Every structure is written in C-alpha cells, then in structure tokens.
Amino acid sequence: MKKSVIILNNVSLYFPKVIGFLSLVRNFFTKKNTRFNALKRVNLEVKSGEVFGLIGKNGSGKSTILRVISGIYPPDDGECMVVGKISLLAGIGTGFSPHQTGVENALLYGSILGHNEKAMTDKLDEIIEFSELGDFINQPIRTYSAGMKARLGLAVASAIEPDILLIDEVLGVGDPQFREKSKKRILDLVSRTGTVVIVSHSFGLMKEICDRVGVVHKGHLVMIGSPEEAISTYYELTGGIS
Amino acid sequence: MDEATPHTEPVEVGLKPSLFKAPFYTLKQSFNNKFLIRNLVRRELRGRYRNSVLGYTWTFIEPSLLAVVYYFLFYMLAGNPDELYAVWVLVGIIIWGCFGKSLQATVTSLTGNKNTIHLVYFPRIVFPVTTVIGNIVLTLMSCIVVFPIILIFDLPFTHHLLLIPISIFLAGFLAIGLGILLAPLNCIYRDIEHFIRFVVRAGFFVSPVMWTYEMALDRGMFGEAAMFNPMLTPITLARHGLEGKASTLPHEVIIFSVLFGLIMWIIGSILFEKFERQAVKYL
C-alpha cells in the first residue's frame, strides 16, 4: 500500500473581513461574526505517485486548498501535513520585473519558486532553449509580448522537479503550437514528479491524466472519485448541461 | 521504492520552531534564501532609477540639493552657521533618509508584495530583509559624495571614515526591527503606514538632521532628552567619522542605540513570525 504524502485533516479556513472602526465597535457588542468561511472541514489524502484533480466553480475554494497545502495560508482548524518538497505553480511569471532582461527574470522567477543558485545555472540553457525567445532573451522584458512573457515563465516553472507538484490553471498560454508543447512539457513533468495535485477547468485534461478527482463546492470537498464520476457530480451540483 | 521521493514522516505545513528562537531563525532563513534575496534586491535597484539620464547619481544629487536648501534656511534663521554646517546637514539627510525609507518600505513590505504572497510561498522575512538591503546599498552609493566633500572642505582622509558605513548599517538595523514589528499589523489596518509616514517626517526634525549633537549639548534639558533618540548615534557617528576624529559620543549613548536596535529586532522578529501567517489573509 502506498503512503499518503498530503494529508488534510478537517481543515477549515476563514478569511477575515477588514472593517471600519464603527462596525468594529458594533460587532464587538453584537458578537456578530464577519469572517468568510472559505474551507469547511476538508478531509483529503493524496497518495504517493498519484495525480489528483480538483474541480469546482470559480470561488469554490479549489485554489485555496492548494494554497493551504503549499503553506500560504495556515488552516484555522484541523491540520495539513505533507511529506517532501512542495512546489506551487500558479500565475506564471509572478514577480517578473519589466526592466530586467529575460535571463535575469528567469533567475529571479526561479529563485522565487524556491530553486537554489546551482539548480538555476544548470538549467538556464535548457530554459532559454525551451522558451524559444532567441535574441529577445537579452532584452528587457517590457519589450516582450504577453505570450512571450508567459513562455518564459512556463519554461522556468516547468524546469523544476519537486516531490509534490501543485498546478493551478497554468495551461493554455501562448499560441497553439506553444500550448501543445507546454502541455506536453507539463505532462512530462507530471509523469516525472511523484505526486501531483492539479486544479483545472479543462475536463478533457482531467480525464486524461488524473487518477482521482475531487469536487469542491462552496468550501466543501463534496466527493472524491474517478474523473467521470466527479465531472457528472460537478454538473449535478452546479446545474448546467452534461 | 521511488528514489526521488524519500518516504519520511509527514510534517505539518508551515510549522515553526519555538517563537523564542525567532530572532535567530529569521536570520537563518534569510541566509538560506540568499540567492532569492540577491535577485529581489537587484530587481528593486533596477526598478528605482529606470528611464532617468542621471540614474543612480540621483542617490546623492537629491540629498545634496536638500542640504543646500537647508543651509540657506538655517542661514536666514540663525545667521552665520559653521562653514561645515551644510555638510553636517547632508550627512544627516543621508543617514536619516536610509532609516526613514527603510522603515517605510519595511512596514509596507507585506502589503506591497501581496501578489507574490498570494501565489508562492517562501519565508516572508525575505521581503523586509530585501527592502532594507536595497536601501542600504542605495545609501552606500550616495556616500560617493563624501569624496568631493573631503577635497572641497579640506577634511582629513582617515580610517575614521569607516564609521559612515557602520552608521548606515546601524540605521538600517534600527529600521528593520521597528518595521517588522508593524508590517503584519499594516496588513490589517493600513493606518499604520500613514502613521509611519508622519513619524518619518516628524522624526526628521526631532533627530539631529538639521541640528547636531554638539548643538544639543548647549541646550540643557532638551539636550539630555535628545540622547534618548536611538537615531542620534548613527547620524553623529557618521559626522564624526567624516570629520576624521574618534567619536566624542559617550559610550552609554552608543550602547543605548545598539541595544535599542537589538531589542527591537528580538521583539519585532518574534511578533512578525507569530502574526505574518494570519495577517496575509487580510491582503
């Protein structure tokens, strides 16, 4: 039997609301709670070597689950435990600086994603080659088109090899050829990485690569099952054509 | 068994060692993330003076121009000041500027990086550390202005000049301690950053920027009170260093300032580590 590498035990998460002075005083007397309950007692175990998908409507809490696993938000209740090094791919190109060159930004983004200097210098050539930027790699990236920036970001992001990979809607950038190429690269990364949790609205992709899929609805992890079951549950819950 | 994923026991995400270790733990984390910090500092420096002809020379043009203005102001108010007065004001502006900018940038370091914080996780102490290092580097650059001053005013060129960089580090250190104390709170109520902007403006006059330690000594009670300003030490040390003499500042004043910085760092890092995780939910 394979070991669980991600364990979420009754995880609840609240987002506080920032309120003004008057309502602060009023709430103090009325004991009214203005917190937003983003995750409600989520239980999840992901086994080693598994590709796990999460689907759900916008704002249902899929990304929040990934952020709890990666350590961005601490759970207010329950516990979240993991085995190994985690990497979260979300919002390709976080922290890009428009005034620095492609190479400098590749190093910057790589270090933001948690690579050390040696790993980045080793992988730099491969990243430059994959991004297909040619001579632009030594130009400041304010001169880049949106697609070029995304290509550079994806090239850096997919060069990593963590124990657990969390992917949040990062596919679908660039032109069709690059999209195909990047999908292949992500799939390659998925097969190389031990454990993957992926959030996506692309149900075709989910059916293709996921072993199990969970449906998130209004902060609850409603069900976990095979991709087909999960997708039909999703349509039952949210209404809409099946 | 898969080689790539060594099977160990599950650990709780984001678990931190005892809060009493925070002052050292944060230092260790900053050291472990030095590649990241270096890249972030570079980003900050590159972004600062982009699209300007004079570029980094602005780091000392700005304080020099201010010093000229204050010289005339003081000339009008008090009449004939010391001929080196403009130099002392310039040194004051540079050192105070390092403290003020570092403090403001540290307090806003979490709120200003909210996009990054939402999308990736790395130890958040990296943000304030980066911004203070960036400000210290810029301030050190502005110190090039010291060399023409030495020539123009015929000051001695001695090893006491080393007091200038030491003062800059002390000013940065005083700023980061206070800044990380307030940074998580600023995520919840932005009132903090508005208040700190006031503190930096007011502190400019309360600290020996337009006046000097020697002037304060002649003022009895007022001079005594000024000794309790932790910024008195870095500004005065830098001035004495430029003058090329061993500092006449009493030891207890220097020790007070350094101790103040250390205590702020200890309290600040403990509170920062305790509250940053909850505070980022407000962003």
Image (cartoon, rainbow, N blue to C red):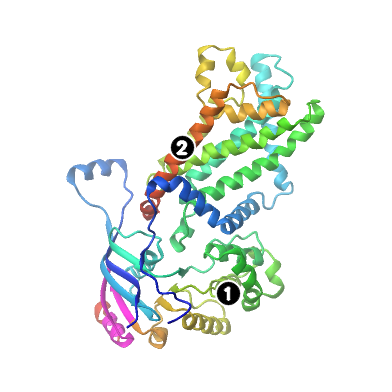
Q: Which residue is mark 2?
A: B264
Magenta region includes residue B127: no
Residue, far left: A30
Residues in magenta, as a range: A213-235
Pick the front one: B154 or A231: B154
Q: Amino acid at mark 1?
A: Ala
Pick the front one: A61 or A236: A61
Choose mark 1 or mark 2, whichever is in front: 2
Q: Position of residue B46 (x, y in %)?
A: 65, 53
Q: Residue at x 60, y 31 (%)?
A: B234
Q: Which residue is mark 1?
A: A155
Vertical arrangement, residue B168 with respect to residue B11, above or below: above
Q: Quadrant of the N terminus of chain B?
A: bottom left
Regarding residue A225, the answer to whether it shows in the image is yes
- Mark 1 belongs to chain: A
The reply, left or right, for residue B40 in relation to residue B71 is left
Pick the front one: A122 or B78: A122
Disc 2 element: helix
Q: Residue at x 61, y 27 (%)?
A: B209
Q: Quadrant location of residue A1? A: bottom left
Q: How many marks?
A: 2
Q: Quadrant of the C terminus of chain B?
A: bottom left
Q: Residue at x 24, y 81 (%)?
A: A236
Vertical arrangement, residue A197 with respect to residue B17, above or below: below
Q: Amino acid at mark 2?
A: Met
